[in-house]
Image: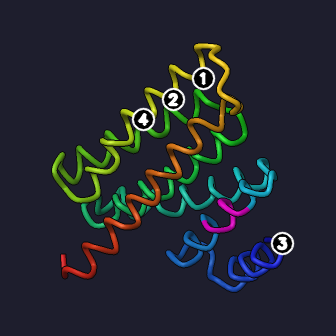
Amino acid sequence: MEQAIALAEQSVAESSAGDPQHAASLSNLGTMLSEVGRPAEALHATEQAVEIRRRPAENDPTAYEPDLASARNNLASAYATAGHLDQAIQLYELTLHGSVRVLGEHHPFSRPLRAVACDVNRSRFICRSGVPTGLENGQHLSLFLKGAWRAMTASSALRSACGE
């Protein structure tokens, strides 16, 4: 994993700050850093990715909301992994509502977000219930958010393959 992190850091260094590839590289780096237990660095990278994705989405929400939602989802996952559950849930809900508002409830990108919202609420209950599960509080939510990311990525790839 350390070799993958080094390559991701190289990709960040080689991309131009502010461009979409830079945001993608930062998101990838943040995900990897989170997975190896470097939450502060993961948060820093994913926060930068969200900021880069936010600017174009403000000007053209329909075109850029999926990219912003994806970056926010990564940041929410990083928050959850770092143990900041309230921030993770708040950001995840913002992502869901923004996507539904801009793209519509039945848009292929919004569907997996809505489905995972149920899992996030279930995770919130599990985390706060005190029921022993063998997972730390943030791990429940982090697992659900990572599932949302995979679902959104698959949905995006499907749309591209279908020419949508």
Residue matched to label 2: 123
The color scheme shown is rainbow
The tag earlier along the polypeptide, 4 or 3, is 3
Residue matched to label 3: 2
Most distant residue in the bottom direction: 14
Residue 144, percent from left and from top: 50, 43
The answer to whether 86 appears left or right of 91 in the picture is right
User: CB under 8 Å between callouts 2 and 1?
Assistant: yes
Magenta segment main secondary structure: helix
- Image quarter (top left, top right, bottom left or bottom right) of the C terminus: bottom left
Residue 71, percent from left and from top: 50, 57
The tag earlier along the polypeptide, 2 or 3, is 3
Amino acid beneath label 4: Asp
The numbered mark at residue 119 is 4
The answer to whether 14 appears left or right of 71 in the picture is right
The magenta region covers 28-32
